[in-house]
Image (cartoon, rainbow, N blue to C red):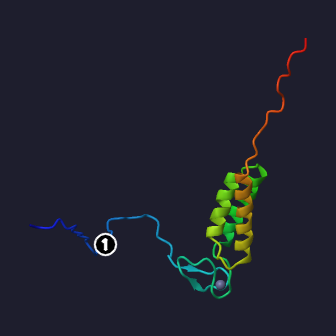
Amino acid sequence: MEGDGADCDEDNGTVRRGFMSAAPQPDPRISCAGCGALLGADALSCPECRALVYAEKLEQLALQARAATDRHDLPGAYAIWKQVLALLPPETRQYRSVDARLAELSGSCRSRRPRRSGRWPAGQRG
Ligand SMILES: [Zn+2]
């Protein structure tokens, strides 16, 4: 009797070919805008000068988050700050302040105050 073993047949070494992209791909390695040091693909800050790799994007996201807060779109702001947090190295001040902001926002989202429609029709006086 043969056991029904799962036979994983992975074909190794399949090179993706035939994918012709018109635009030349940029260098996958990122170099620091500040000092030019080569950074890893998942680096969030430069190990040399501690510059934030995604500083520009972070600024844009922060603007969007503030705009969302201004129009009282707290869930929207929360989602954007989450993105900001993902791009910040945890040891930075920015990370902590954004983290605190997220805590605030999640707090204000949770504490839903029951709305009371104030005016009840008063009994008719007759
Ligand atoms: Zn640098």
Residue occupying the point 62% across, 85% down: 36
Q: Where is residue 112 in the image (x, y as percent from the top left)?
A: 73, 48
Quarter in which the C terminus is drawn: top right
Residue 60 seen by the camera: yes
* Residue wearing tag 1: 15
Q: Position of residue 57 (x, y in %)?
A: 66, 67
Q: In which quarter of the image is residue 16?
A: bottom left
Residue 64 seen by the camera: no
Say whether residue 18 is left or right of residue 116.
left
Residue occupying the point 50% across, 73% down: 26
Q: What's under tag 1, amino acid-wise?
A: Val
Q: Where is residue 54 in the image (x, y as percent from the top left)?
A: 64, 72
Asked which secondary structure carries label 1, the reply is loop
Q: Residues within 10 Å of mark 1 (few under 14, many from 20)?
A: few
Quarter in which the N terminus is drawn: bottom left
Residue occupying the point 70% across, 62% down: 102
Q: Quadrant of residue 6?
A: bottom left
Q: Where is residue 114 in the image (x, y as percent from the top left)?
A: 75, 42
Residue lying at the far left in this picture: please name it.
1
Residue lying at the far right in this picture: please name it.
126
Instruction: Work out whether 62 lies above or below 50.
Output: above
Ligand 1: quadrant of the figure = bottom right
From the Cβ of disc 1, is ligand 1 less than 8 Å away?
no
Residue lying at the far top in this picture: please name it.
126
Instruction: Work out whether 104 lies above or below 15.
Output: above
Q: In which quarter of the image is residue 117?
A: top right
Residue lying at the far bottom in this picture: please name it.
48
Instruction: Work out whether 78 lies above or below 9.
Output: above
Nearest the viewer among 113 and 24 is 113
Say whether residue 109 is left or right of residue 29.
right
